[in-house]
Image (tube, rainbow, N blue to C red):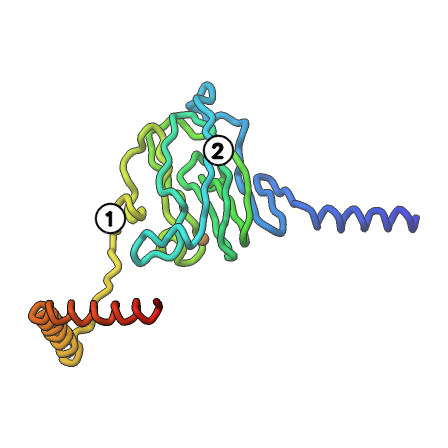
Amino acid sequence: MKVFVMSLMLLIVNSSASAMNHGGMLMDEKGMIMNANSDNLPRDCTKISENVDITIHAGQQNALKFTGKMFAFDQQEWNVKPCAKINITFINDDQIRHQLMIHGLPGYLYPEGMFHLELYGEGQLQASLIMPSLKKTYLVHCELPQHMEKGMKAQLKVDGGDGDLPSIPGISRPVRADVYSVDWTELSLAVLLLSVLLGCAILFFIILNATAIKDFSSKIIKKIYVKKM
Ligand SMILES: [Cu+2]
């Protein structure tokens, strides 16, 4: 009896320590896969049209090329055929948590209409989904607070999509643009004016004394050269 109880306890401990699978959710200490679907066809598809392998990186270094942004995926748009099967490799290059969520999918296949990958830090996940046939643009983003607003937003187009979503970095204009206004005071205006005047004065000095500067610099170069010899 003792042995049986101990084996049962070990089994419980082992199964909770390894990956848990609750319905459509796969979870372990590194991340989570929710609503992956590599077999079930959407109702409007008779077969899988194409197999598309996509690698998506998430991380701060991808945002460097976008002014004012902090997080981004390495690409902001993907295009697939109707009824395509997409095999996603999601790589988080940051030490912080990121998600890859696709919204607007049919609820009978993807609960809440959502496909969701998540990594709590650096790492990699793989999962597939099958897109319906509808010509549509799907939102792809990270839902952590301020991550989408700070640039982690993209779009997935099926059959060319039905337009661009707003605020996709490098693709579409923001609904409400960030403003980086300068607080002009008398002092900052004075500093600007002084800098311009000083810059002009230096430029004039160089132009007026071009020959003298040239002679002076060649003398110095000669001296250094002679010393070295
Ligand atoms: Cu994120």
Q: Position of residue 64 (x, y in %)?
A: 36, 54
Q: Which residue: 53% across, 39% down?
A: 35
Q: Which residue is mark 2?
A: 108
Residue 156's spot in the image, x, y percent?
37, 37
Residue placed at 7% from the left, 70% from the top?
A: 208
Residue at 31% x, 30% y: name it.
Answer: 160
Question: Is residue 200 shown to the viewer in this render?
Answer: no
Q: Which mark is residue 66?
A: none
Disc 1 marks a residue whose amino acid type is Arg
Figure check: 26 above or below 109: below
Residue mark closest to the camera, 1 vs 2: 1
What x and y, as percent, mark residue 103? 41, 41
Disc 1 target residue: 173
Q: Earlier in the sequence, mark 1 or mark 2?
A: 2
Q: Position of residue 185 (x, y in %)?
A: 16, 78
Asked whether residue 223 appears in the rendered view, the answer is: yes
Question: At x 12% / y 71%, what residue is drawn?
Answer: 212
* Residue at the limit of the structure toward the top, as seen here: 46
Side (left or right) of 138 relative to 43: left
Q: Is mark 1 within 8 Å of ligand 1?
A: no
Specify the amino acid type for callout 2: Tyr
Q: Quadrant of residue 182?
A: bottom left
Horizontally, residue 217 falls left or right of residue 90, namely left
Q: Nearer the viewer, residue 218 or 190?
A: 218
Q: Is residue 105 above or below residue 206?
A: above
